[in-house]
């Protein structure tokens, strides 16, 4: 038996007036998704436990059958693992976004956050900015590491791993002073670092060049999601199958590495809607051909479009995932002649209206090549909810798919 799990990150949404009050899933032309959903077990699932933040680490851990309430230690340590950082027990990892703040205000706190991704800055550009932060702010206690695009990492010896930072994508368009770390609750060092980062980055040659080209500057660091060294059980030992993960983002790669899965990188996989969809399909087929029983394909594009409020691009990304990833991998599995199952679901919603994650249940389907079922004619939030097949604990869903020997 072969298993494909396809995660269009943040695909689920609410009705959008600009789409005729349809959701992007309803609007998208996705015949492959709809065909399989019509012959599948369908329903709704909650991947984010009550009381937990609806982040991708939490939701993807749940989909991979690891209870986030037990195993989640924040997304930053997982990203650190993917970046090859050997964390020590006394070190804390922090996600370090390079973001765009307005520049006309005199006080740092009065600035408005315009973009959590600085127009999805390129990794080579961001690397120069992170090196500048390391040169000026790094020391024996803390070190900055370059990740991908706007997503980077700060490792801090004896750092506070429980500080409650605000996620930058939750406050787009807002004055940052209401959301910055505060000296009154132990955040003084974090606040100073973020303020100092602005002075270092605002006139950096990379940002001057970006502004000259009409692009947003990455003029401040923003810290969030702290955590200590992670540990997950072996996925292979738990399920008795060889597993691979394919993703463009360090977070998902880190989960895979911590769970002992083979982690596969794809050239041209960006994390945005211009990613290499066909390349991910080819990588999935190769993973199956090389002996993987289980392949987990994560696509960040719909989530980034949700954060950026890009309505048409979110629809476009769903269509590309359906036809350039799901269709060819489904065709490959059929041609192999072995029984297979395919599960498709977003990890969490990223509604265009709020431009951040939400905790609502998401639709899923599980297709079994041996026994087709009566599913839904169109794979949408509304249709799957109408089936009245709801699973409150997302970490139990994979058990409905995988058949243990």
Image (spheres, rainbow, N blue to C red):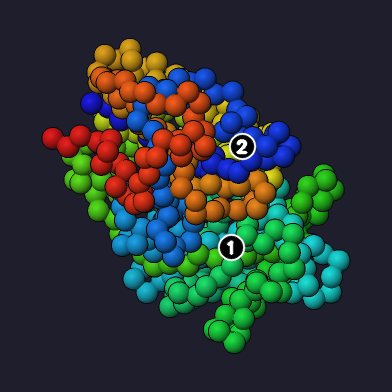
User: Mark 1 vs mark 2: which is more N-terminal?
Assistant: 2
- Please tell me whether residue 403 is drawn above or below residue 219 in the rendered image: above
What label does residue 167 carry, if any?
A: 1
Determine the image quadrant of residue 375: top left
Does residue 55 appear to the left or right of 26 in the view shown? left
Residue 358, horizontal then vertical, whole percent: 54, 53
What label does residue 11 carry, if any?
A: none
Residue at x 59% of width, y 23% of height: 29
Label 1: which secondary element: loop
Residue 192, horizontal then vertical, whole percent: 65, 78
- Given residues 93 and 237, the one toward you in this image is 237
Does residue 63 appear to the left or right of 217 in the view shown? left
Mark 2 neighbour class, 10 Å CA radius: few under 14, some 14 to 19, many 20 or more: many
What label does residue 23 carry, if any?
A: 2
Residue at x 36% of width, y 68% of height: 88
- Given residues 397 and 257, the one toward you in this image is 397
- Given residues 52 and 257, the one toward you in this image is 52
Q: Is residue 267 visible?
A: no
Q: Is residue 91 visible?
A: yes
In which quadrant is the N terminus drawn?
A: top left
Determine the image quadrant of residue 158: bottom left
Measured in 3D between alpha carbons, the distance from the residue under mark 1 to the one under mark 2, in whole angstroms, is: 25 Å
- Please tell me whether residue 93 is drawn above or below residue 349 in the rendered image: below
Determine the image quadrant of residue 389: top left
> Which residue is most to the bottom?
184
Mark 1 neighbour class, 10 Å CA radius: few under 14, some 14 to 19, many 20 or more: some
Label 2: which secondary element: loop
Residue 119, horizontal then vertical, whole percent: 71, 47
Residue 125, horizontal then vertical, whole percent: 67, 49
Does residue 252 appear to the left or right of 302 in the view shown? left
Residue at x 50% of width, y 64% of height: 225
């Amino acid at each position: 038996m072969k298993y494909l799990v396809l995660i269009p990150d943040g695909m689920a949404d609410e009705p959008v007036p600009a789409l005729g009050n349809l959701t992007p899933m309803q609007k998208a032309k996705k015949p492959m998704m709809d065909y399989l959903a019509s012959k599948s077990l369908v329903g709704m699932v909650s991947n984010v436990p009550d009381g937990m933040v609806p982040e991708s680490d939490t939701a993807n851990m749940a989909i991979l059958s690891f209870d986030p309430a037990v195993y989640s230690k924040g997304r930053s340590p997982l990203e650190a693992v993917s970046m090859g950082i050997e964390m020590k027990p006394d070190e804390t990892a922090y996600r370090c976004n390079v973001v765009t703040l307005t520049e006309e205000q005199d006080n740092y706190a009065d600035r408005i956050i315009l973009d959590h991704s600085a127009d999805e800055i390129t990794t080579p550009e961001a690397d120069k900015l992170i090196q500048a932060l390391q040169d000026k702010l790094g020391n024996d206690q803390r070190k900055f590491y370059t990740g991908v695009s706007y997503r980077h990492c700060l490792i801090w010896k004896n750092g506070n791993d429980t500080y409650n930072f605000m996620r930058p994508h939750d406050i787009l368009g807002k004055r940052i002073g209401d959301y910055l770390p505060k000296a009154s609750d132990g955040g003084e060092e974090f606040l100073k670092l973020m303020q100092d980062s602005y002075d270092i980055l605002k006139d950096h040659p990379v940002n001057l060049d970006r502004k000259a080209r009409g692009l947003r500057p990455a003029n401040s660091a923003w810290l969030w999601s702290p955590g200590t060294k992670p540990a997950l059980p072996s996925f292979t030992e738990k399920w008795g199958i060889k597993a691979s993960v394919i993703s463009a983002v360090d977070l998902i790669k880190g989960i895979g590495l911590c769970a002992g899965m083979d982690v596969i990188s794809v050239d041209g996989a960006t994390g945005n809607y211009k990613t290499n969809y066909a390349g991910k399909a080819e990588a999935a087929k190769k993973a199956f051909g090389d002996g993987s029983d289980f392949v987990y394909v994560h696509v960040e594009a719909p989530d980034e479009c949700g954060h950026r409020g890009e309505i048409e691009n979110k629809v476009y990304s769903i269509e590309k995932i359906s036809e350039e990833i799901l269709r060819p991998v489904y065709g490959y599995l059929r041609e192999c002649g072995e029984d297979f199952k395919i599960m498709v679901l977003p990890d969490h919603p990223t509604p265009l209206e709020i431009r951040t994650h939400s905790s609502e249940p998401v639709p899923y389907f599980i297709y079994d090549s041996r026994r087709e079922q009566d599913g839904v004619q169109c794979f949408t939030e509304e249709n799957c909810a109408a089936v009245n097949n709801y699973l409150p604990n997302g970490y139990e869903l994979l058990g409905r798919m995988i058949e243990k020997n």
